[in-house]
C-alpha cells in the first residue's frame, strides 16, 4: 500500500453485541452514547486529516463505526469508506435483520475488499491485520478482555499505529449500570 494512502487512512476494531453490556438493545442509552462517541472519534480523525476509513463489517460496533463514517461522508464528500470483508459469505448465518443492515451498509461503501472466498480458521485475524496494515490510526471499542479486539490493538501497537480507545462507555457507572 502507498505510504501516503496509509497516512490518511483510519481503521476500526470493536466488539460484537454479545460482548457488550446491552447486547443487541441499541436503544440503551449506553449504546447511543457509544454511537455518538464513535461519530466524534471519526470526526476528530477527519479534522486530523484522515479521509479514508476501513471497516471489518462485523455486527455491533463495526456497524456503528460504518454508520458514523457514512454520516461524516454526508458532511464531507471527500471521505471514502472501505469494507474489509474476511470472506465472501460473512453474513450468511446472521439473522435476516443483520443481513439486511450489512447489505445496506455494504452498498454504500466506496470500496469492497474481500480477503478470501470461503471461511477458514484465521480468516478473521487476516481481516484484522489487513485493517491495521492499511491504516495509520485505529479507533477501538475494547472492554479490556482477551479476544480479537485485544489482539488487533496489540498488533496495531506493534505496527506503530495511533490508537483512539473508547472504553469508558463500556465501564459500569457507580450504580452498576
Image (spheres, rainbow, N blue to C red):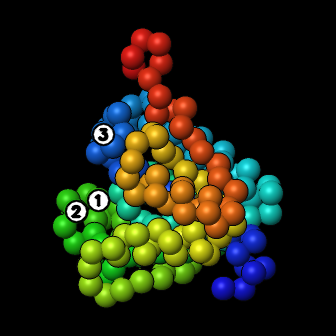
The residue nearer to you, when weighing 67 against 41, is: 41
Query: Can you say which quadrant of the picture contains the C terminus?
Result: top left
- Name the outermost residue toward the top: 175
Q: CA distance from mark 2 to mark 3?
A: 15 Å
Image marks 3 and 1: residues in contact by CB distance under 8 Å: no
- Looking at the rendered structure, the secondary structure element under dot 1 is helix
Q: Which mark is residue 98?
A: 1
Q: Quadrant of residue 77?
A: bottom right
**The N terminus appears in which quarter of the rendering?**
bottom right
Query: Is label 1 in contact with label 2 (beta carbons under 8 Å)?
Result: yes
Residue 152 screen position, x and y as percent: 49, 60
- Local packing at callout 2 (Cα closer than 10 Å; few below 14, some 14-19, many 20+) is few
Left/right of residue 9 with respect to residue 99 in the rendered view: right
Percent across and percent down for residue 113 are: 48, 82
Residue placed under numbered mark 2 in the picture: 94
Label whose residue precedes the other's in the sequence (3 or 1): 3
Amino acid at each position: 500500500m502507498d505510504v501516503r494512502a496509509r497516512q490518511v487512512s483510519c481503521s476500526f476494531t470493536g466488539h460484537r453485541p454479545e460482548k457488550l453490556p446491552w447486547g443487541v438493545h441499541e436503544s440503551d442509552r449506553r449504546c447511543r452514547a457509544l454511537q455518538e462517541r464513535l461519530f466524534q472519534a471519526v470526526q476528530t480523525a477527519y479534522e486530523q486529516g484522515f479521509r479514508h476509513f476501513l471497516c471489518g463489517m462485523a455486527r455491533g460496533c463495526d456497524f456503528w463505526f460504518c454508520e458514523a463514517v457514512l454520516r461524516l461522508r454526508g458532511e464531507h464528500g471527500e471521505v471514502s469508506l472501505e469494507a474489509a470483508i474476511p470472506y465472501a459469505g460473512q453474513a450468511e448465518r446472521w439473522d435476516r435483520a443483520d443481513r439486511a443492515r450489512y447489505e445496506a451498509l455494504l452498498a454504500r461503501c466506496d470500496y469492497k475488499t474481500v480477503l478470501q472466498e470461503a471461511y477458514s480458521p484465521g480468516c478473521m485475524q487476516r481481516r484484522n491485520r489487513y485493517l491495521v496494515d492499511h491504516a495509520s490510526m485505529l479507533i477501538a471499542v475494547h472492554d479490556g478482555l482477551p479476544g480479537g479486539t485485544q489482539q488487533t490493538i496489540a498488533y496495531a501497537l506493534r505496527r506503530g499505529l495511533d490508537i483512539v480507545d473508547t472504553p469508558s462507555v463500556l465501564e459500569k457507572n457507580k450504580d452498576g449500570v
